[in-house]
Image (cartoon, rainbow, N blue to C red):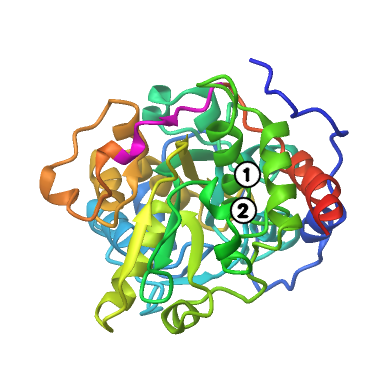
Amino acid sequence: MYIKGQQRLSRRLVPAVLAAIALPLAACGGSASTTDATAPADVNAAKEQAKEFRTAGMPDDWINFGEFYQSVCDAYDLGCNGSSVAGVNRNDTDMSSAEEIAAFKNETTNAPMCSDIGIAFGQVAEEEDVLLGYTPEAAAALPAAYKSADGGWVASAVGVISIMTNIDVIPNPPRSFADLLKPEYKGKVSIANPVTSGTGQATVFSTAAALSPTKGEFDMDAAMDYWAEFYKLGQRNEADYSAAAFERGETPIRLAYDFVNIQAADLVKGKGVKTEIVIPAEGGVWQPSATMCNKKTEDPDLAKLVLDHTLSDEGQLVFAKVGARPVLYTLGKLDVPAELKTSWLPESQYANVIQYPDDSWPQPSIVADRWENDVLTAGG
């Protein structure tokens, strides 16, 4: 299916994305593995590799990766601690999707084993030839847009862009993309940067789905027109979002994945801060995060187990505990017990959310290019 507006600009990486991928990164000791990437994991080798391994962009609280990695350790009897906070066996470095691909490409030793990326960055990782060529058997259940054809990344958990508001500061919160353009919210809305961030790209994709004149389709022109108007009206909050800034009312409205906002609201609830989280009334699109693993990792067998476990029932249900919908659940291939859905937003809010209608997501470079040229320039 042709996505209206996707091809307005050439398929070049904008400077910010190109710089992130080309950036030389510091190397550590060790050497890359020559293990057959397509072969099943050697669990005994993985047990040795699990004594010390590195991830990127997979903090413990992001879709519950701390518990997920502990589940990997336990499911395969690896004897490891999955918590990156504990740092006994796993160490994690916070990075954006573009920075993770740069680390895979440029670090020659002790490179990150696996990372979490925004789904559209999977094709960038493929183009940069940084992926471990392994595909879990369970990936056969995924549509083309949710996995790499040649292995190395698979969708994990699915989110939808939501609006979270500190209603102690803004008692009449916005509940739609149209609301966000109202004068009363000028300078109050925090969004992620679509040039380098998977969440930022997801925010653009939500409006491409929600604002398309044809229901069920994707209209990038409509999305860019909306965001140009958003910037022209001065709606963006220029301050960096943080839980503390949200609590103080300095960044009172935030667009982020539903499961991210659910966790953020839980953090401030104990301090008496009242919040509202809604899926915009116009809808959005189901957008998976994806787990990608590095072809240069020194821990290839452990990486294969991570990819396998990502699509196992046990691994999928770990994501559900924090409000992230397991990808197999959204595809109708997994049941989630009611007790794991207690933190989820009501299903009725997702009535206008669509499945992505094509086999590949819009190129991040195109989205970033259009953001800089059609949104920031026009709105600035």
Query: In the image, what residue type sits under mark 2?
Result: Gly
Distance, label 2 to label 1, CA atoms, is 7 Å
Identify residue for label 1: 204
Query: In the image, what residue type sits under mark 1?
Result: Val
Write the start and end of the magenta stretch as one range. 349-357
Q: Find numbered disc 2 in the image and state the secondary structure of the residue it sits on.
A: helix
Q: Find numbered disc 1 in the image and state the secondary structure of the residue it sits on.
A: helix
Tell me the tag on residue 200: 2
State whether residue 271 is above or below residue 310.
below
Which residue appears at 69% of the width and 48% of the height?
A: 227
Q: Position of residue 130 (x, y in %)?
A: 68, 46
* Viewer-nearest residue: 113 or 176: 176
* Viewer-nearest residue: 234 or 279: 234
Which residue appears at 38% of the width and 68% of the height?
A: 171
* Viewer-nearest residue: 243 or 89: 243
State whether residue 281 is above or below residue 195.
above
Q: Position of residue 301 (x, y in %)?
A: 45, 49
Instruction: Specify whether residue 179 is in view.
Output: yes
In the image, taking residue 184 as reference, residue 283 lies left or right, namely left
User: Residue 17 occupies which quadrant of the picture?
Assistant: bottom right
